[in-house]
Image (cartoon, helix red, strand yellow):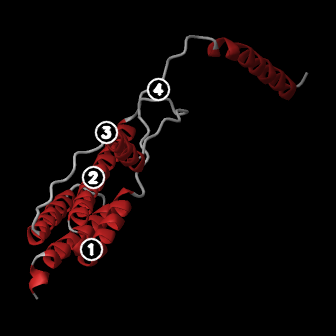
């Protein structure tokens, strides 16, 4: 037998032995889910922070939307003035909730399918609040006072969106800045703009 033949025979024997030993390795105790590395943990933390930020932003806009609905119900004569602003606030609430980040727990196995999104969280909280019938939003009896209350609510929401800019990812920060600016314009239109 030549040297090449012996090497081939030896290699085949080692491969067969390794293949025979392999099933024995896989029947040992399962070590459980793998521990996430630092990058995975950080990515999960960032995703969860963004999802929480989106939920807070959507909640602020939906609260403002409820104020508009209450004012329109209490003062139907204000509809021509409030309806375009309410439509804008509704569009802002929808835009702020879109594109939620998917969060997969870093401690779960790689095959886990349980994920949560900011949009789903916002939808779940909205449906939960719909089931518990939120208390009605108080509205001033005087239409001018009701407009001032709406302007104050617009400023509050705008301030919340502006404060969130610090921790928001760049794309979402641009959206928040736009919504905050629109809120400031709405507040002006509800108060100062009425005098012009």
Of pointers 1 and 3, the one earlier in the residue sequence: 1
> Mark 2 to mark 4: distance in Å?
36 Å
| Residue furthest out toward the right | 1
Mark 3 touches mark 2? (CB < 8 Å): no
Instruction: Tell which tag, 4 or 3, sits nearer the viewer.
Output: 3
Q: Secondary structure at mark 4?
A: loop
- Report how far apart the C-alphas of labels 4 and 3 lie in the structure: 41 Å
The vertical placement of 29 against 5, above or below, is above
Mark 1 crowdedness (10 Å alpha carbons): few <14, some 14-19, many ≥20: some
Looking at the picture, tell me which residue is in the foreground, 183 or 86: 86
Q: Look at 41% across and 42% down and name the residue there.
A: 103
Residue at image point 35% right, 47% down: 126
Q: In what element is the residue under mark 3?
A: loop
Which picture quadrant has residue 132?
top left
- Picture disc at residue 20: none
Residue 10 locus on image (x, y percent): 79, 20
Distance Cα–Cα, label 1 vs label 4: 58 Å
Please name the residue shown 37% across and 63% down the image.
95
- Residue 179 is drawn in which quadrant? bottom left
In the rendered view of the protein, which quadrant contains the C terminus? Answer: bottom left
Q: Nearer the viewer, mark 2 or mark 4?
A: 2
Are the residues at dot 1 and dot 3 in contact (C-beta closer than 8 Å)? no
- Across and down, in percent, residue 172 comes to 32, 62
Judge depth for marks 1 and 4 and give the one in front. 1
Residue 5, visible in the rendered structure: yes
The foreground one among 97 and 164 is: 97
Q: Which residue is mark 3?
A: 132
Q: Which mark is residue 59?
A: 2
Tell me whether the residue at label 1 lies in contact with that at label 4, contact meaning CB atoms closer than 8 angstroms.
no
- At mark 2, the secondary structure is helix
Image height of 28 relative to 137, above or below: above
């Amino acid at each position: 037998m030549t040297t090449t033949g012996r090497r081939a025979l030896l290699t085949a024997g080692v491969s067969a032995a390794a293949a025979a030993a392999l099933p024995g390795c896989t029947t040992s105790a399962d070590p459980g889910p793998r521990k996430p590395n630092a990058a995975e943990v950080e990515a999960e933390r960032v995703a969860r922070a963004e999802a929480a930020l989106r939920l807070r932003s959507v909640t602020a806009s939906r609260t403002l939307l409820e104020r508009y609905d209450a004012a329109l119900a209490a003062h139907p004569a204000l509809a021509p003035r409030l309806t375009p602003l309410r439509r804008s606030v509704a569009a802002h609430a929808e835009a702020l909730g879109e594109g939620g980040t998917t969060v997969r727990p870093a401690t779960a196995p790689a095959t886990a399918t349980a994920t949560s999104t900011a949009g789903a969280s916002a939808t779940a909280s909205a449906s939960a609040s719909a089931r518990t019938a939120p208390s009605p939003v108080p509205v001033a009896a005087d239409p001018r006072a009701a407009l001032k209350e709406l302007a104050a609510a617009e400023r509050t929401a705008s301030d919340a969106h502006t404060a969130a800019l610090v921790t928001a990812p760049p794309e979402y920060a641009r959206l928040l800045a736009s919504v905050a600016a629109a809120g400031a314009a709405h507040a002006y239109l509800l108060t100062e703009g009425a005098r012009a």
